[in-house]
Amino acid sequence: MRKTSLRFFFFLLGFIFNPFLFGDAGGISKDIVLDFTGDIMSHTENLIAPDYKTAYRDIANLLQKDDLSFANLEFVIDETTPILGYPRFNVHREYVEAAIDSGLDVFSLANNHIYDLGISGVFQTIRAVAKIRDKYERKVFFSGIRGNPLENFKPVLIRVKGIRLGFVAVTQFLNRLEESPYVFVADYRRKKDRERLLEYVRKWSGRFDIFILSYHGGVEYSVKPDKRKVSFFHRLIKEGVDIVYSHHPHVIQRFELVPRDGATKLILYSTGNLISGMVGKSAEAHTSDSAIFRVYCRVKGSGNCCVIRVRPILITNFRDSNGIIVIKRYGEVLSDKSLDSEYYHKRYLVLKRVLTGKGE
């Protein structure tokens, strides 16, 4: 009888103080590391590589050491059409699979080039993505397009390390003037679109531990975000987004840590290019240079995400000895005595100034 009473007593204590039953009663927190990269382009210079994984060779070990890696796929994936470079981009599955094999996991499909081949290109991309997900047992994630215009654009739910992460991708515009119900489009310059997206954020923000919104938009080749974009991204944070992850300018812009409700949120105004054929020829050609933004987050309790630290890992694109465009970390480039150290050092300093908001 006494043993039964003791068992009941300890069971009752465990029930009362169990943090999994009563939220954050024990102050339990979970940490997660996220890498945010820029646009994956498919210029002719990239498509002629004999092995697409060559481009990522020197950063794969970095991308494979995080919990999730993000990128924007700036093309259609239509295997019924030949691969195409600029101005209408199209690839086949192996081009995307090379990025996945190198460590990238989460992809935005909402951008101005996703409609380069019209509705059929969007549908073919959906089919290709389904095959990719099946191959990788659904451990890769895509957002930004849909096959049924009657279905809502729902954030993708990603579970990692016991954390519920919501991810949704949006683009400012499409290259074609026609509107498409198959791509998530919201132009921050139009009041109606702004209010619609803010309402969408309010609806979904409380349902995840971390809510990430990918936004493809802004002024191309500008190293400073325009004022309307800055203002709108702050509104997104205020309404419940934890990390605004933006791209499209093809150059990096500064990032900003934003306080909200006792925690710190993050705006990445532009992550530039991860890989492209836009290799610059001078220190002012910012399209060659970018960063992998390593973001350390802590989730304490349900839906309480705080960005602890942001570590920009500076990278550049250049042609290797075989003429193939590859991604290199700047630390390795600056220590390579076979390269023009003065030229790359100048670009490195320009890149650091841009990141701090002191660029051109």
Image: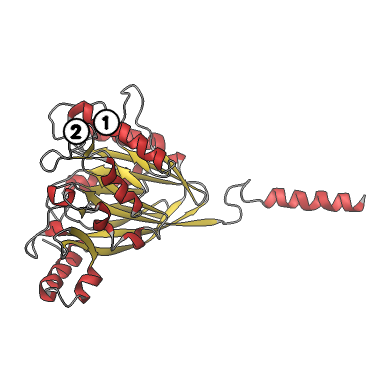
- Residue 160 picture location, percent across and down: 47, 49
- The amino acid sitting under disc 2 is Thr
Residue at the extreme front: 50
Number of callouts in the render?
Answer: 2
Image quadrant assignment for residue 110: top left
Between 188 and 40, the residue placed more toward the observer is 40
- Compared with 185, 140 (above or below) is below
Residues at badges 1 and 2 in contact (C-beta under 8 Å)?
A: yes
Q: Is residue 75 among the parts visible in the rendering? A: yes
- Residue 348 picture location, percent across and down: 17, 69
Residue at the extreme right: 1
- Residue 158 picture location, percent across and down: 44, 43
Between 244 and 77, the residue placed more toward the observer is 77
Between 109 and 93, the residue placed more toward the observer is 93
**Mark in the foreground, 1 or 2:** 2
Q: Quadrant where the C terminus lies?
A: bottom left
Q: Is residue 183 among the parts visible in the rendering? A: no
Residue at the image point whose x is 42% and y is 51% from the top: 261
- Which residue was labeled with disc 2? 81
Residue at the image point whose x is 18% and y is 40% from the top: 83
- Which residue was labeled with disc 1? 124
- Compared with 343, 73 (above or below) is above
Q: Specify which label sits upstream in the sequence, 1 or 2.
A: 2
Question: SS class of the residue under badge 2?
Answer: loop
Specify how the rendered protein is coloured.
secondary structure
Image quadrant assignment for residue 54: bottom left
Residue at the image point whose x is 31% and y is 26% from the top: 147
Compared across the picture, whether 357 is left or right of 258 comes to left
